[in-house]
Image (spheres, helix red, strand yellow):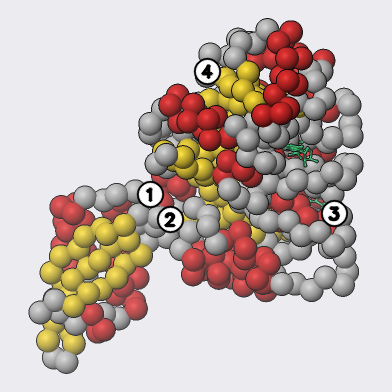
Amino acid sequence: MALLAIMGRPNVGKSTLFNRITKSRKAMVDDSPGVTRDRNYADAEHDGVKFSVVDTGGFSKNDPDAFVDLIHFQVNQAIEEADAIAMVFDGKDGPSPFDRDLLSVLRPIDKPIFYLVNKIDSADLEYLMADFAELGVGELHPVSGEHGYGIPTFLDMIVKVLPKASPKLEEDMISIGVVGRPNAGKSSLINKILGQERLLVSDTPGTTRDAVDTVCQVNGKPYLLLDTAGIRRKGKVKHKLEKFSIVRALKGLERCDVALVMLDATEGITDQDVHIAGYAEERKCGCIFLANKWDLVKDKDWALKKIKDDVRMNAKFLNYAPFMTISALTGQRVHRIFELVDKVYAQYTTRISTSKLNRMLENAITRHEPPYHKGRRLKFYYATQVSTKPPTIVCFVNHPDAVHFSYKRFLINHIREETGLDQTPIRLLFRQRD
Ligand code: GDP
Ligand code: GDP
């Protein structure tokens, strides 16, 4: 789906516009100093055209030095992916030096850019636009994110320039959930990945905020990190009294393609970790075990073998989940996580052709004949893959209920061997055929 990036200095009204365009409450509008927001991403539709919108307003409002970061952040992370850009000015404030700085960075960018003068709440205020002529940017459009003035006209223009269907984001973007018990290092990992430690969402007591996902770009490829705000928030408010909440721990599993199951390597795999891993298995998403805090581990050779053995032993059911050690604190091997995510995702989305599948089924049956059922041999007719994420195979049998668990496991393992699908869950379903 095509992507529109909203840019502009703090307080010009980016997130208000974002909310108006996406008709969502996903961005957090907050005037209190120091409250920052994640780069925010949601879908919008106008005139039957669907597109995605990203609000690039993710940096500390009360830190003047953060402006350099802002430019870096907006340009590198949003512009590269965007198909069109909305550059927003504050009609009430008039042009500022910050606006000029941003414009200078935008200049070499060869993408459609719309210059919006925001806070023009009605036609009466259009006179405020005159101040912006000196910026010399060509056509300026009056809008009001808060009241909707000028928005339909703006959206008409936007959907005209957006590419109709860009395969770039939606289908290709892998969504990643980070799960684990409190203190495993989830928020540290998120911060390390985003490389913007100062983006921490500060907790204002009594306010609630919706889940915010963050797009991050690694080697030019976008990934969607799920519920980053929630993870960071939890990371900050925990204290001794906090009880382990499985519901909370599992939130990241709801929508993800790949779950990063974080363990604290200094503590090994605990019952709670196994519990979480069990849910990940049930959810049938791709999974990766991350043994975190590796920087604290003393005898690394011995510890690696020990924790790996323990994970394999205690979470046998996730034997397809790759395992790696990291340090969210030092960043050790953090970039390698994405290589693994790509591998797991490739397997998770694999399609096996029906002919190949049936050849495999035949081989499997020859190698290990199906057991008898009420004196008659179980008959496997044919198999076909019905979906991906994970690869889901339906196999037609004369007595589906009679397929023993161990034979099902044998078939799955056989498929794994022949296809090389060793890092993804595989679903095998049996359907009746007489
Ligand atoms: P951001 O930092 O660029 O994301 O700005 P926000 O969306 O958080 O808005 C900053 C302030 O400007 C908030 O107090 C908004 O209520 C106000 N604001 C945003 N859009 C408009 C608008 O169209 N008209 C008026 N009058 N105020 C607005
Ligand atoms: P969360 O509750 O899972 O989000 O965990 P946090 O990210 O808040 O981390 C819990 C504590 O462990 C914090 O004090 C972190 O600084 C610390 N921590 C997280 N990752 C590492 C790591 O890789 N190495 C070390 N030494 N400490 C870490």
Q: Residue at x 29, y 49 (%)?
A: 351
Work out which quarter of the rendered image holds the N terminus and state it. top left
Q: Residue at x 87, y 72 (%)?
A: 241
Cα–Cα span, label 1 and label 4: 32 Å
Three-letter amino acid code of the residue under disc 4: Lys
Three-letter amino acid code of the residue under disc 3: Asp
Cα–Cα span, label 3 and label 2: 37 Å
**Disc 3: CA contacts within 10 A as few (<14), some (14-19) or many (>=20):** some
Q: Residue at x 79, y 33 (%)?
A: 11
Residue tagged by mark 3?
203
Q: Which of 392/135 is in front? A: 135
Cα–Cα span, label 2 and label 1: 9 Å
Q: Which of 143/33 is in front? A: 143
Q: Which of 263/196 is in front? A: 196
Q: Is residue 426 left or right of residue 283?
A: left
Three-letter amino acid code of the residue under disc 1: Thr
| Residue 17 % position (x, y) | 65, 38
Q: Secondary structure at mark 2?
A: loop
Cα–Cα span, label 4 and label 2: 38 Å
Residue 111, disc:
4
Q: Earlier in the sequence, mark 3 or mark 1?
A: 3
Q: Earlier in the sequence, mark 3 or mark 2?
A: 3
Which is in the foreground here, disc 4 or disc 2? 4
Residue tagged by mark 1?
349
In this rendering, does residue 329 appear at all? no
Q: Secondary structure at mark 3?
A: loop
Q: Secondary structure at mark 1?
A: loop
